[in-house]
Structure formats: C-alpha cells, structure tokens
Amino acid sequence: MVLTGEMMAPVVRKAKAPVRVRPAAKPELPLGQILRGDCIEEMRKLPTGSIDMIFADPPYNLQLGGDLFRPEGGRVDAVDNDWDKFDTFAAYDRFTREWMTEAQRILKPDGSMWVIGSYHNIFRVGATLQDLGFWILNDIVWRKANPMPNFRGTRFTNAHETLIWASRDEKSKYTFNYRAMKTLNDELQMRSDWVIPICGGQERLKRGGTKAHPTQKPEALLYRILLACTNPGDVVLDPFFGTGTTGAVAKRLGREWIGCERDPIYCEVAEERIEAALPLDESGLKTMQSPKSQPRVAFGTLVETGYIQVGAVIMDKARKHRATVRADGSLLTGDHTGSIHKVGASLQNAPSCNGWTYWHIETKDGLKPLDSLRQTYLLATEP
Amino acid sequence: MVLTGEMMAPVVRKAKAPVRVRPAAKPELPLGQILRGDCIEEMRKLPTGSIDMIFADPPYNLQLGGDLFRPEGGRVDAVDNDWDKFDTFAAYDRFTREWMTEAQRILKPDGSMWVIGSYHNIFRVGATLQDLGFWILNDIVWRKANPMPNFRGTRFTNAHETLIWASRDEKSKYTFNYRAMKTLNDELQMRSDWVIPICGGQERLKRGGTKAHPTQKPEALLYRILLACTNPGDVVLDPFFGTGTTGAVAKRLGREWIGCERDPIYCEVAEERIEAALPLDESGLKTMQSPKSQPRVAFGTLVETGYIQVGAVIMDKARKHRATVRADGSLLTGDHTGSIHKVGASLQNAPSCNGWTYWHIETKDGLKPLDSLRQTYLLATEP
DNA sequence: TGCGTACATGAATCAGAGG
DNA sequence: GCCTCTGATTCATGTACGC
C-alpha cells in the first residue's frame, strides 16, 4: 500500500524482527550427507530431538524381498497362505515400528513427519503412527495426473498415492506455512488432494539407459511438502533416501538435509544429482507470511506513533457503529469502552471480533480497515 | 518404494463375468428390511456365505476438542454423537475386528466389502481388514467438490474421504463391472479418485428443520459403488445403515438390500425414504455422472513443476511493471507482494485483475502471457 | 417471474502468548 | 498448569428474501 501524506507518521519505531534467526551450525549433525547403511542403525547415531522434519518413503517388498521382513530363519511354505500373510504383515509392522520409533526420538518436539505409501502398506503405516503417539494432521492424496492404466481391466485405475502428515505428538506446535500454501494455490486454501504429474522426462534419473530407481518421486511433491512444513535452515531427514529427491529439493529451497540409504548405486546417483542442484537465492525463498508470524503491533502503538489520532472516529464497514479513539488506544462508544476487539465483539453481540478488520477509518480514498494502517506501519518500520 | 497391484498379486485372477442370472428368492434372508439393533448381533443371525456385497460406514472416532467457530462467528455443528465416541484406539480396534469378523463370515466366497472413513479411523480399518484376510483391491478417494474449509488455517483443507474395496479373501472372484465404469467415465478407465459433491440440497434429509443424520452420504457415491461391484438382484448389506442411502440406491438400481441400525429415529427416516425411492430415470442418471474434475491450474503449480523458475522476472504487456516470482508462487515488486492477481490489481489500482493474461514472460518468440504457459502445462499433463 | 444479495452449512482430531 | 486476552480465519452450494 502507498502512504498518503497525512497517514505518514512522524515517529517511526522499529518493530521486532519477524524473520526467525537462521539456526547456528549444527556440528553434531551430518548435514548434507548420505549415511550409507540401514536407516534404523544410522538414526540411532543421531541425537535426540535434533531434526525438524522427516520425509519417508518406506519400502514394501513383501513379494520381492520378503526375507527382509521375516523372522530369522523363517522359511515359509507358500501353500500356507494365511500364516504367510499374517507373518508377513506382522513382520512389516515390526519393521515399521522400529524405524518410526527412532524417527520419533530424533524429531524435535515440534517436528513433524511425512510418510508416503499405497494401499499395500499405508494402512499399517498409519495405524503404527497412531499407536506410537504421532498425531495425524492430514492425510494427503497425491493424485497422479498421468497414472499407469490398469491393463487387465480388473480394478479401478490406481491413480493416487497417500501421504500422511503427522506431528511428533499431539501437543506439537508444528510448522505450517498456511499463507505460502494459499498463495501457491491461487488464493484458495490448499486442499488435501494434490494433482501432480508422475516423475518422468528430464527429471527421471537414468542409469545405463534404464530408470535408476523404480519409484522416484517427483520434485514437485517434495517442493510442496518442504515449502509447507519447514522454514529455511531447517533440518530435513529422509531415512529411505533412494535417488535423493528430498536432498535435491531441500538444497534448492535452502533447507539442510540428511539421508539414509543402503544401496551404493542409489547413493552415487543421489550425490551426483544433489551436487548439480542449484540453490535458489534468498529473495526467491521469501514466501508470503501469515500475520501470525509477523511482529505483533498493538493498536496503541499506532496511536502513540501518530498513525492514528487521539479523538479520531472509526466505524464499521457499514458505518453503523462509530467509536472514538482514546489516548491509551481504547475505544469509546455510547455504551462500551475497551479494546478494538472487545468493543467490536460487544457491538455485534459476537463471541469474539478481530478489531483490525472490523473497524475502519475514513480516508480520501474511502473507508480503510485499521489493518491497512497496521500494514503501512509494518512496511515503514521493517528493516 | 511401493509395488504396483500387479506385483502384489502373483496369482492372476479373473474378475467375475459381469452378467449373471438373477438369483432365486432368498427366503432365509430379511431382504428389504432394517434390522433394528446392534449390527454385530444382527449379523450373527444371518447365514454364512449369503451376502454378495457389504457397504459399511462405521463411526470415524473423530476425537474432537472444544467448539469451533467460523470466522464470521457461527459455530460449527460438529459430530458429537455418542455413537462416535471410543475410549482408546484399542477399543476402536476391538469394535472394528468384531463387526468385520461377522461381515466376513456372512459374505459369499466371491463377495466384497467397501468401507469408508477418514484419517481418524481408516488406517486402523485397513490394517484390520488385512489382518483378517480380506484382500484389498483398491483404495478409492472421494474428492469432495465442496468440502468445509479449514477455518483456522492450521492444516490443509480436509477435502476427501477414503474408501477401501476388499474381497472376502485373496482367492475371491469378485464382481467388477469394468465396462460400466468405463462408460460412466466417458470411455476412460475409471480411476481411484472420484469427484463427487457432499450430500446437500434436496437430497439431504431433514427432521424437524435440521439434518436428520450428521454424516449422510451422497447417493452418487453409492450409485457408483453398487454399479461397479454388484449385479441386479445381488444382496447388499449395510451394517451402519443410518438414513438408508445404501438401501435407497440399491432399490433404484434393482439390488436387494438389508440394513442394520440401532437408532429408531434413523430407522424411521430411512424407511420413509426408501419407500419413496423410485427406479432411476434417465435424467437422474445424467446428473450423477460427472466423474471428471475441472482442470484448474494454480500459478504455484507451474512454479513447483518448473514450468516457470523461481526468480524469473515477469512483466505486463507494455513492460511497464516487472515482478519477480518467489518460491510459493507469490510475486515481488518494489512495493507489493502477493498472488499474480493481487499484485496485478494493485499495480493497476484496479479492484481485480486476471494475472494469467496480465503478466507475460520473455521468450525467444517475444512476450508470452502466463496463460500460454498454463496451456502448455495442461497439454503435457492431461490424459 | 427473475435477478441479485444475504445468509446458512458441511465427518473438524482447528491458537498462542502472557500473567 | 490454569486463566485471560489478543486476534486470526472460509469454499462451494443451496435457500431465502427483497426489489
């Protein structure tokens, strides 16, 4: 907004810095590294409460690598399907519980975790999350813009995968960049169903002419997740790093990353890829902020600094109610006195009221909400 | 890493032929009746292997906190019914296991079951299904065309619910009317994500001026399910009948139905409703067939997918105003930040602006409006 | 009757700082 | 931990009502 002469205030006071300080170096964390080994063992080496966000794309090798999840020495008769199934699910649950327990330990109290899966494993993943005390915040549907058709025509085309977003526990004050998501979605709230193309074309990593990894995730998916749930400088860990999509996007978005990966080929591919990824410069990384994260400005400050005059008359949008501004930033009407919020609520007979948007002031360009005065003040006082 | 359905199903099973002889009368079954009582007890009275399909809409176990108010002051009428309250996840699991065990018993060997839920319960539901030996065929996402927003801006808008379709066991030759689904979807394979509006308007049943049931499902949802997975004359059971959407649609589609419901008011409403239900006429059919979603593309999507770079400079046609693209799809100029539409409007001092046509990007063929980029994106990602 | 505006509402795990 | 206060926050429909 543009300042008019009479709105320009004589005294400019500096507001509290809105940007959170970039965390100091974390020498105890292997930032920007791929930990080559089993993720459970590798996570055990990381300090408790040190990770801001985890993105996990766990394997589900029930048929191909069944031995991975079976108890020691268990050779299962293929005929005994019931036992096989039960045993396999139980083993998968144990595996899930193990890596998630470590993940929960290394997460900061306000950290959150994303897990992606399909109907083969996502229900077990979700139930285990809940059993461990993670608090589910959303399930997100990645709706594939161009899925593989069902060639045999025996089922519905499997056109989506499911992601679960959960905070470390019910009390966590998780990060959610609401305003950035709303902006990203053309000024509509971002929904729980995301339409994103599958990974292909130039983005799809090849090795010897064939795809380097069977389930490489699109960078657009990680982009949205990291933008939504982390801040620049945050530490993101991916226990099933694969070809390093998480690392590449984290680097691009100015987030720190750590990966775990057992397969040396994947590690090699990932390292080359992340090496080539270019970080965005800082101005591009700035995103739209919610007022929540902006420095608070008291109405009284605007009075003190002359942005609004003592004795000024303010009114609601319909000009039905009027109030006079007093020296301490309280309002006076016929029947009520109090803060801009209190008086607004009383007049409307409402449980609460945001006085910043309820009250307006007359200008030569018409009525303007107090909030626009506040924005003017913020713009003038920010570094 | 996730396996595809084919990889998970080593045994190739043929789906049941879509045409089937209408079964003889089933005098032992209480067809067209609502069994008034607890569904577990009522199902125990039904013969083993007698039901073709089950649709279940069990309690979600929402675990809501205090009141939630809308921004304009109204209070959200939440689901606070006793039937949705469970003490612990374990209690919910026991309940789930109990009703599903009976459901599995009364299903025919080639029968299948649908269960609907949200992230609060669906993971437990899915895991229990698998534990009991049900074989998951698809998870289906009901993408709500008009969900309730997230009023507090704390999470992603919860815009979908999940349905699981599972056969009684791995060997079941389940019914899937592939052709009917493809026809319903304009000659494209029916996908696993369905766009259907929530139940409202005339369809929403009222009792004494207010909604008769807090969670009435849209008939369009049941229509698609019954059309896909049953044949005329099949017996459909709904253990959580509520206001009888399943019965009403079954009647319209010439399927037999049985319901279980404890609440006498719901029973009464359902009976009246089904009594009034008529065989589907062509016009009614038409309105329910809109499976395709609008291809709406947000500017942020182009940023995420790399169609436009973060840091790119865009300008109006006259090259008078320039702006830089940031990571969340917002624009940055000297004086303004915001969406392409908002910044465009501010610069022109206009109440609104179509950013897609206002902003241009420099290419080797000269300036091109953002809208042409959007068209390129749509061409590349549309089926 | 028709149009434009105002209002109601839907399965919701919906705040955070300061005293 | 509890209580108080500030103040942030909504999309798509359908219906009702006024002109």
Image (cartoon, coloured by chain):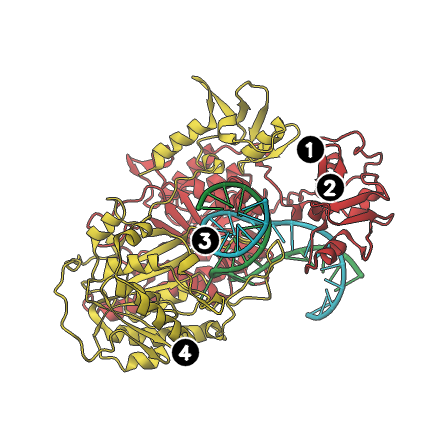
Chain colours: A red, B yellow, C green, D cyan
Picture coordinates of residue B206 (x, y %)? Answer: 45, 66
Labels 1 and 2 share a subunit: yes
Could you classify mark 4 by the number of other residues whose Cα lies within 10 Å: few (under 14), some (14-19), or many (20 or more)? few
| Circles 2, 4 touching at the beta carbon (< 8 Å) | no
Could you classify mark 3 by the number of other residues whose Cα lies within 10 Å: few (under 14), some (14-19), or many (20 or more)? many
Q: Residue at x 23, y 48 (%)?
A: B183
Q: Which circle marks residue A1 in the picture?
A: 1
**Foreground: disc 2 or disc 4:** 4
- First in residue order: circle 4 vs circle 3: 3
Q: Tag 1: residue type?
A: Met
Picture coordinates of residue A112 (x, y %)? Answer: 53, 55
Q: Which residue is mark 3?
A: B159
Chain letter of the residue carrying label 1 = A
Please say if B67 is above or below B281.
below
Labels 2 and 4 share a subunit: no
Q: Tag 2: residue type?
A: Arg
Labels 4 and 1 share a subunit: no
Q: CA distance from mark 4 to mark 1?
A: 60 Å
Q: Which residue is mark 4?
A: B264
Chain letter of the residue carrying label 4 = B
Q: Which one is nearer the viewer's eye here, B198 or B254?
A: B254
Q: CA distance from mark 2 to mark 3?
A: 34 Å
